[in-house]
Image (spheres, rainbow, N blue to C red):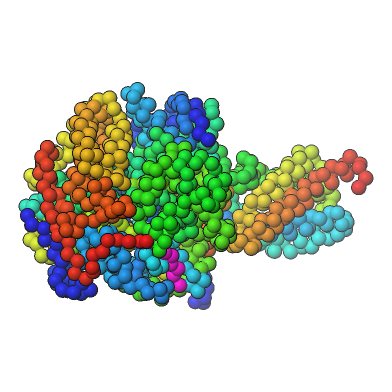
Amino acid sequence: MSLDARVPIGPLSEKWTKCKNELKLVSPTNKRKYDIIVIGSGLAGASAAASLGELGYNVKVFCFQDSPRRAHSIAAQGGINAAKNYQNDGDSVGRLFYDTVKGGDFRAREANVYRLAEVSANIIDQCVAQGVPFAREYGGTLANRTFGGVLVSRTFYARGQTGQQLLLGAYSSLMRQVERGKVKLYSRHEMLDLVLVDGVARGVIARDLTNGNFEKHAAHAVLLCTGGYSNVFYLSTNAKGCNATAIWRAYKRGAYFGNPCFTQIHPTSIPQHGDYQSKLTLMSESLRNDGRVWVPKQKGDKRRPEAIPEGERDYYLERKYPTYGNMVPRDVASRNAKAVCDEGRGVSETGQAVYLDFADAIKRDGREVIRQKYGNLFHMYEKITGENPYHTPMKIYPAPHYTMGGLWVDYHLESTIPGLFVLGEANFSDHGANRLGASALMQGLADGYFIAPYTVGHHLAGRKLPKVSTDGPEFEEALRAAKGRVDRLLKINGKRSVDSFHRELGRIMWDKCGMSRSEAGLKEAIAKIRALREEFWNNVKIPGGNAELNQSLEQAGRVADFIELGELMCRDALNRRESCGGHFREESQTEENEAKRDDENYLYVSAWQHQGDDKEPTLHKEPLAFESIHLTQRSYK
Amino acid sequence: MEKKLNLTLKIWRQKGPQAQGRLVTYPVQGVSTDASFLEMLDVLNEELLKKGEEPVAFDHDCREGICGMCSLMINGQTHGPDRETTTCQLHMRRFKDGDTIVIEPWRAKSFPILKDLVVDRTAFDRVIAAGGYASVNVGNAQDANCILVGKESADRAMDAAACIGCGACVASCKNASAMLFVAAKVTHFAELPQGQPERYKRAQAMVAQMDAEGFGGCTNTYECEAACPAGIQVTTIAKLNREYLKSSFAYAEESKSSEGEG
Amino acid sequence: MGWLRLLGKEYLLNWLIKALGSSIGRKFVMGLTGLLLIGFVIVHLAGNLLLYVGIEDYNNYAHALHSKPGLVLVAEIGLLALFLAHILIAVGITRENRAARPEGYQMRRSKQNRTAATPSALMFVSGAILLGFILLHLADFRFHLRNPGPDGEEPFAKALRLLQDPVSAGVYFVGSLFLGWHLVHGFQSVFQTLGWNHPKYTPLIKKAGVALAVVLALGFASFPVWAMLKKYGVQL
């Protein structure tokens, strides 16, 4: 199967308009004849389901949480980008496009990114109309701030809770469609398999988490909006429940996986403090607007931060990147933090942390101004660490945060399985090898509000979709497979907890496939992961049964998938013998230890095709062509 | 500085929605003061698993205080002893060595227990579905800056919109009333121009659904405000009362003829 | 008579029925009746204070009040309606509120900066005690079921005599304190219920509520004390 991205021909700025003009439409009276399944209720899922419901389709939304409002989009703190140019600082669609492509280190599909920049302004309009309480100036207009990797202020925000407010906006639109009867909610449900009929995605197998009932649901299209897979690292900034099961099962049913090794390690997380730790908490990147990152110049300097005089501090980001300073993109900031800690200049008891210091900002603007900007973040930091950041610098360290990789999709956001659409973080499309801050919210909502509603209609109108019954053989087969897998897990009755496997996987991934990757390390990781998978399926212990709320069982299924996905990530990282964005191969760096891209050999999207559980996946390549911009080695100096 | 605690936990165990529940005592040793409350429960669950017992089921997700999934009545207080803090953000340095901690689920007729400490809060979703939105379809929006919102109004709207929907207000209220939850949403929209067109309908519909779900009424004891991890204030309830009172006079049920698609 | 129809059947009555059907509506009625009853209690206290002014003044006031039996009847029916509404709704919402949590907590602790026994948490209890006090008061003064006095007894003498009954005096004293207790929460609560919560005025309302409660409680409690002191010959 060749990879056709279905990017319209023509000038970049006219592609989306041209595409929309050519898309087939479903007549208003026919829309009610179509059923659509949406998995996941985050920004992408909730916005897509609400929009499709508004159009008149019958939508079913599934989420594993008790309410769609809890999806992890809610935790995004900083903001959402849009090329509004409200600040009159020279912003434009073209500039947002360019920043995003450059930020992604030229590994994203140009046409998708341009479209994202184009619709970014509509997102803000839509959200404001819904009543999202964005920050305002005294005159009543919208306020903006700046984020990493850019030189304009284009980020809209609602205190430190932008993701929450955007998600609640999408959620409220979703609930409006629930009230109208156009959307049916299935909360505390988990998708366990995708059902294909005649090669087209026509339904899912879901498990009701409260009682273990397996359900078959048929539809004319399936949308996966299930977010990313950072939890493959065990410790990440994702919610505990975030998982890759839906996209992984779709991968096993034939959807290609794009750029699995492209993961983002966020530079400003609260460092790890103990073995029992269950997650890492992010401190918004917006803090770098006012905080200064530094470590002691001397190795092993154990003095309290306040006791270290100015001259003995190394503000290494400001020193190395005078133009962008503390606001360099995330991958650059993270890698530099790791580098200074590897040199032995890291702080805190573990040596795995750097300072983020607000003393100068407080001196300059006063404590009250800083409190107004970051009060809730400071409060949160103090809750977790017991230290007061108004008095002593924050300690931060990079943490797995976002996965740019995901299921491969074409310009229509359709995967290699017809009728299977993938939106938001779950797809690979817009961020290349590194995502800029405040772009994830933008992408999730762009996909859900402004892209999928058109392209899904094209699929429905353009393909013959005969009626399918959930009693058909394809549903029965998928149901048997899902049940069989659960039975198999429950029968193992070994000695180790699910969590212990997950932690072990996380350590392997963090050490070998984290901020820095090498051929030897990745090969070692693949061997270790295979052994871990073997042990998991022979020695995991899951108490309780299927027919009840069983959190260990839920987790076991997810970890089993993470183990397999981890292997694919390492395989992809091994294949990509260049450094780009968040993917840093030790074999490919400049003399100054900066990431070195290899456009000659790796200017493509890796799309992996599953061949069977014990077979190696096949690599397909989607070449990346940049028509409108010139490829440069990124520089933020 | 990190210290280790030995604690006695008394945890509500209940097999299923219909089963009889009871408090079961579990000793835990060597809990780090740097651990979060939920991490302490993780440690307990690992130990239970080793002993071949079923782990304690509890709701949690983001573990950073925003998703509203975690709950827990800790020593008779929602989300534990701290103000404006969720259970996941509560850390063990807040407890002393030798403490006994009683852990119960939220209790309300409208929040039936599913298992152990897990309760069903879908009643909140249904209350939002009744009117917690501005009815704008995608594609209708004008330029965002065409709607001016004064900073003070925007701030008040944001204060109310910060609700995380955890249900602590219901759990802490002696009447299991959901008034603070409903008030937060009604206030959020009442403060903004976008919320005006459906203002009266919203107040009526959401209160009617709240009552239908079986939540208790408000008797102005203000325990909800003290319990709320998002700092929602009871001034929102006054606002809701005002909106409701006004709407009772001003709002007429839609006539049948004006009923469109919805 | 269109306006009457509008006011009566089509609008006000419908509104009342609808209001009583919703939790907030019931609270409005609760608060409004409470507020009107507070008004009555204030007037009542003012009248009673004439006991301290002089025998003549008190007697004249009482006679003047009772010289218009029609008015008294209307007032009594009105008061009865207010009380009944207030009490019946209280019973109703208390039952509902209990039903909203069928299984209680094993352990309970407030997160507010206050002690357990606060006025707001015990409105039903203080209200029930108040009701007992009022019933006794009515039995004494209105229906003469206990300690009936001689025919033609002057109001001042009657009040003094009834207040000197040790049981009545005790109940009146405690009842008056509970009235204050009830109003500490009740007064400011009405404003919250009616939607008048404002950062500028609410602290003032709360203080005014406490002051009013204290004045009313001490005012009413002073009468049995005064009567008993008189009984045992203490010179005032």
Q: Is residue B90 above or below residue A175?
A: above
Q: x%, y% of residue C200?
A: 64, 63
Which quadrant of the structure image shows residue A559?
A: top left
Can residue A410 be seen in this snapshot? no
Q: Is residue A589 above or below residue A566?
A: below
Residue pictured at 18% horizontal, 74% vertical: A11
Q: x%, y% of residue A108?
A: 23, 60
Can residue C233 be seen in this snapshot? yes
Query: Residue A145: within the magenta?
Result: yes
Query: Residue C139: within the magenta?
Result: no
Q: Nearer the viewer, residue A427 or B115?
A: A427
Q: Residue furthest front?
A: A591
In which quadrant of the rendered image does the C terminus of chain A lie?
Answer: bottom left
Q: x%, y% of residue A152?
A: 39, 68
Q: Nearer the viewer, residue C182 or A73?
A: A73
Residue pictured at 33% horizontal, 47% vertical: A400
In which quadrant of the rendered image does the N terminus of chain A lie?
Answer: bottom left
Q: Nearer the viewer, residue B185 or B208?
A: B185
Which quadrant of the structure image shows residue C109?
A: top right
Residue pictured at 73% horizontal, 42% vertical: C174
- For this view, does C148 lie left or right of residue B85? right
Q: Nearer the viewer, residue C51 or C140?
A: C51
- For this view, does A415 lie left or right of residue A402? left
Q: Residue furthest right?
A: C235
Q: Is residue A288 above or below residue A306?
A: below
Q: Which residues are magenta?
A: A141-149
